[in-house]
């Protein structure tokens, strides 16, 4: 079901003690957030166990930021979807633009990662979004449409029900530039209609998050849009008060 959702992507930030303190600060004020808003924290792998312990018993859910494209075995340095599930994760972010750009993740790899995440009971938070030059060339619909078709169209309806989509224009990530509410709504509606082309009415139930310099000052306007169901938050998720203020912006 479509759910108001705010997910914090901590990226490669905080040491374990700092992450634990941040999680504790969030849990301490989580009662301020209406109970129909799902809050998700995605700390680094090393923090999952500790943060998982701190949020246990609270409505906050745990997510990883990535998983391996292999099941198990001799893949030094990788972390499998099964390991994440055993660490208490319910979600995993996949296809973040930083992974696509710096670690050369392709739709082929992402197909394998999504399948493994779903097979292990994790809900993928699947990220799509265009680069600045693609938007300037008016190619954003093509780029985002292809990212969706190449990965999500391979799923069954039953699998798709478990996926959260995050639209994150690359030019807005960590830059302070936010897509206007109009720009964001336009492409969120496009994502929903693309999904409807394959999955029919199920598309109405898919949670689609906006990500890219979302902060307390712009969250309200973005979340008021018909097809924006919440946010994937980077920088502003590292301060408990800002993150919770965003979660209160519906
Ligand atoms: C992100 O990378 O998921 C993100 C949205 O980052 P920021 O909020 O810092 O732009």
Image (cartoon, rainbow, N blue to C red):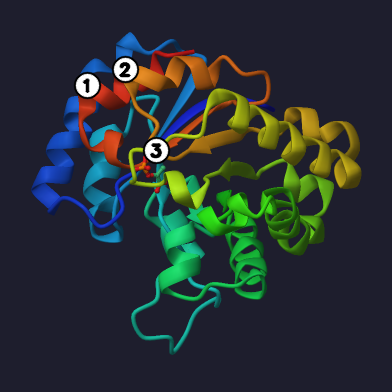
* Disc number placed over residue 85 in the picture, else none: none
Q: Is 81 displayed left or right of 191 in the figure?
A: left
Query: Is 136 rendered above or below residue 206?
Result: below
The answer to whether the residues at label 1 and label 2 have Cβ atoms under 8 Å apart is: yes
Q: Pointer 1: residues within 10 angstroms few (<14), some, or many (20+)?
A: some
Query: Which residue is under mark 1?
Result: 241
Indicate yes or no: mark 3 CB to ligand 1 under 8 Å: no
Tell me the mark number nearer the camera, choosing from 1 and 3: 3
Q: Is residue 104 visible?
A: yes
Q: Residue furthest left?
A: 17
> In the figure, is residue 121 to the left or right of 39?
right
Q: Could you tell me which residue is drawn at 23 percent across and 38 percent down?
A: 238
* Among numbered discs 1 and 3, the one appearing first in the sequence: 3
Q: Position of residue 8 (x, y in %)?
A: 36, 38
Q: Position of residue 29 (x, y in %)?
A: 24, 16
Q: Quadrant of residue 102?
A: bottom left
- Label tally: 3
Q: Mark 2: which secondary structure?
A: helix
- Image coordinates of residue 79 in percent, x first then y, are 40, 70
Quadrant showing the N terminus: top right
* Mark 1 to mark 3 CA distance (whole Å): 21 Å
Whether the residues at callouts 2 and 3 have beta carbons within 8 Å, the answer is no
* Element on which disc 3 rests: loop
- Determine the quadrant in which ligand 1 lies: top left
Residue wearing tag 2: 245
Q: Position of residue 236 (x, y in %)?
A: 28, 34
Other-residue count near label 3 (Cα within 10 Å), few / some / many at <14 / 14–19 / ≥20: few
**Drawn side of residue 20 relative to residue 57, left or right:** left
Q: Can I make out residue 80 in this image? A: no
Which residue is the site of mark 3? 177
């Amino acid at each position: 079901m479509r759910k108001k959702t705010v997910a914090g992507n901590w990226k490669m930030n905080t040491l374990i003690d700092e992450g634990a303190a941040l999680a504790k600060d969030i849990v301490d004020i989580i009662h301020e957030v209406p109970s129909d808003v799902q809050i998700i924290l995605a700390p680094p792998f090393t923090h999952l166990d500790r943060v998982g312990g701190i949020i246990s018993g609270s409505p906050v859910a745990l997510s990883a930021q990535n998983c391996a494209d292999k099941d198990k075995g001799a893949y030094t340095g990788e972390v499998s979807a099964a390991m994440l599930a055993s660490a208490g994760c319910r979600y995993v972010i996949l296809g973040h633009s930083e992974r696509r750009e710096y670690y050369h993740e392709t739709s082929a790899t992402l197909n394998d990662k999504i399948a493994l995440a779903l097979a292990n009971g994790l809900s993928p938070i699947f990220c799509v979004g265009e680069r600045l030059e693609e938007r300037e060339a008016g190619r954003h619909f093509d780029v985002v449409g292809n990212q969706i078709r190449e990965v999500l169209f391979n799923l069954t309806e039953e699998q798709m029900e478990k996926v959260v989509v995050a639209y994150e224009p690359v030019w807005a990530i960590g830059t302070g530039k936010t897509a206007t509410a109009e720009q964001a709504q336009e492409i969120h509606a496009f994502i929903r209609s693309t999904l409807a082309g394959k999955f029919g009415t199920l598309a109405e139930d898919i949670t689609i998050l906006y990500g890219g310099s979302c902060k307390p000052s712009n969250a309200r306007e973005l979340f008021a849009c018909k097809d924006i169901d919440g946010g994937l938050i980077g920088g502003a998720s590292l301060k408990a008060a800002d993150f919770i203020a965003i979660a209160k912006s519906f």
